[in-house]
């Protein structure tokens, strides 16, 4: 099993950007192609939301499809669909894509086109300009309003330099078309990225949220439609059959309209099933009021100190769910020093392996983030205590949240989901 954050993963991942498709010399033996073929012939296909949406987007372009036409579609955890659909019906460009493009052009020059030195120069220039744009976008870990940011003169200047470098690379690559498969595929990507960058530079189109996000070395620029209702409805009409949406958090006060409006659904039937759990007698919710702010210095140590006796008393059988990877690392280290019970941490191996180790041990504390907040089913006594470091609300200044003005409803939905997680495993 490979750890989730293994550096080998990007090198063995097939994406739209790096797959050569039918031009690939390994096309006939390719595992990805075989898996897609198998899926097209299967009676039952299980995929995640992202793959389903990627398939819709691909069908939309007329370039092909990954998932066969089916009679019944069942979406579990369907409350995630509106946000995921927004990503696929929007557009984005990232520094990774630009750097990968520059890298591939450089490889094409070094391996097959040694007589075209200009390729190396334009690739290096694109790579440098992309890094310079990252530098003027500010602090890492921030998601901001691109419409505002693009008024900033240094950002305008660096964005223009990236656009010019991309244009130049496109022109130079065009001169060597037909001489290298790698360069031909890079040329197609350069065309696509040029169009996206033009689209993202024009921030006047209404009905979209324009936003950017930065990590330490990378950035992404994104446009997301404020409503996917019309497009999603078109997809439903184009694909006959039953569409079933299920989740613990689709309704707010027994009313599904917030969810159905966002996806443009006109449900034939709606059903709320009450929980089989006796919350009143079997669940206990504790909210310590004396803790410092969630982001304050030394909070992980305080949590370890306060909660170690509870985890010990409970004989492990406990999930500690965090909202950041840093917190996972700090807590795992702290608990390992204090507890005699086994402590598992997300990232150290794959999610499935972690879960099976947790079940096998029977007395472990699992410290995790993201992937373990939902979609996990641990039955019986194996999970009887769930601790969270804070409620996973999106920051109020998040550009997408602001654009959608959905704060109140999101809180209701997330809170009820969180409470459900907390009590899900009780007998
Ligand atoms: S077709 Fe070739 S490039 Fe694409 S995923 Fe398969 S082996 Fe990789």
Image (cartoon, helix red, strand yellow):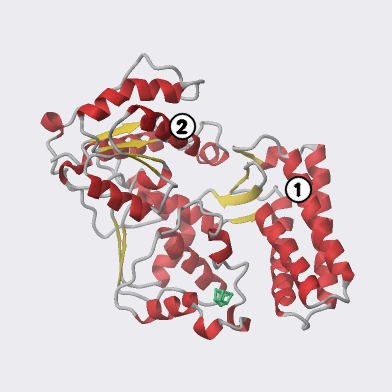
Quadrant where the C terminus lies?
top left
Q: Where is residue 258 drawn, in percent x and y?
A: 37, 44
Looking at the image, residue 31 sits to the left or right of residue 221; the answer is left
Residue 26 badge: none
Element under disc 2: helix
Residue 131 badge: 1
Distance between the alpha carbons at the discs numbered 1 and 2: 30 Å
Nearer to us of marks 1 and 2 is: 2
Residue 330 badge: 2
Which one is in front, 350 or 65? 350
Task: Looking at the image, tell me whether mark 1 or mark 2 is earlier in sequence order.
Answer: 1
Quadrant holding ligand 1? Answer: bottom right
Number of other residues with Cα within 10 Å of mark 2, as a class: few under 14, some 14 to 19, many 20 or more: some
- At 36% from the left edge and 57% from the top edge, which residue is drawn? 265
Which one is in front, 387 or 58? 387
Quadrant where the N terminus lies?
bottom left
State which quadrant residue 179 falls in.
bottom right
Element under disc 1: helix
State which quadrant residue 276 falls in.
top left
Q: Farthest residue in the top direction?
A: 290
Which one is in front, 322 or 329? 329
State which quadrant residue 157 falls in.
top right
Number of other residues with Cα within 10 Å of mark 1, as a class: few under 14, some 14 to 19, many 20 or more: some
Q: Where is residue 271 drawn, in percent x and y?
A: 21, 52
Looking at the image, residue 227 sits to the left or right of residue 80; the answer is right
């Amino acid at each position: 099993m490979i750890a989730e954050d293994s550096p080998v993963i990007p090198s063995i991942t097939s994406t739209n950007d790096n797959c050569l498709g039918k031009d690939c010399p390994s096309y006939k033996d390719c595992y990805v192609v075989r898996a897609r073929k198998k899926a097209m012939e299967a009676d039952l296909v299980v995929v995640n939301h992202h793959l389903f949406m990627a398939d819709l987007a691909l069908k939309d372009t007329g370039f092909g499809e990954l998932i066969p036409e089916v009679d019944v579609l069942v979406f579990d955890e369907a409350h995630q669909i509106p946000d995921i659909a927004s990503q696929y019906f929007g557009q984005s460009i990232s520094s990774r894509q630009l750097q990968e493009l520059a890298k591939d052009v450089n490889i094409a020059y070094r391996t097959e086109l040694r007589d075209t030195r200009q390729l190396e120069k334009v690739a290096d220039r694109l790579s440098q300009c992309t890094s310079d744009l990252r530098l003027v976008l500010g602090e890492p870990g921030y998601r901001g309003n691109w419409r505002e940011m693009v008024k900033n003169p240094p950002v305008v200047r660096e964005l223009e330099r990236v656009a010019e470098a991309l244009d130049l690379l496109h022109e130079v690559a065009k001169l060597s078309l037909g001489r290298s498969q790698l360069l031909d595929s890079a040329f197609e990507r350069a065309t696509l990225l040029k169009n996206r960058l033009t689209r993202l530079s024009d921030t006047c189109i209404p009905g979209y949220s324009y936003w950017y996000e930065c990590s330490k070395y990378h950035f992404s620029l994104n446009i997301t439609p404020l409503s996917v209702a019309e497009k999603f409805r078109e997809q439903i009409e184009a694909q006959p059959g039953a569409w079933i949406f299920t989740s613990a958090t689709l309704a707010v006060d027994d009313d599904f309209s917030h969810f159905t409006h966002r996806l443009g659904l006109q449900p034939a039937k709606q059903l709320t099933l009450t929980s089989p759990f006796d919350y009143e007698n079997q669940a206990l919710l504790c909210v310590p009021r004396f803790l410092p702010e969630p982001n304050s210095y030394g909070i992980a140590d305080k949590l370890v100190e306060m909660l170690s006796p509870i985890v010990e008393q409970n004989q492990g059988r406990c999930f500690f769910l965090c909202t950041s990877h840093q917190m996972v690392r700090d807590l795992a280290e702290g608990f390992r020093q204090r507890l005699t019970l086994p402590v598992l941490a997300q990232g150290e191996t794959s999610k499935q392996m972690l879960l099976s180790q947790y079940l096998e041990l029977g007395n472990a504390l699992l410290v995790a983030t993201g992937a373990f907040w939902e979609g996990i089913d641990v039955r019986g006594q194996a999970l009887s205590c769930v601790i969270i470091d804070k409620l996973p609300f999106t920051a109020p200044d998040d550009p997408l949240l602001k654009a959608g003005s959905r704060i109140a409803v999101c809180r209701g939905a997330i809170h009820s989901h969180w409470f459900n997680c907390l009590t899900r495993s009780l007998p």
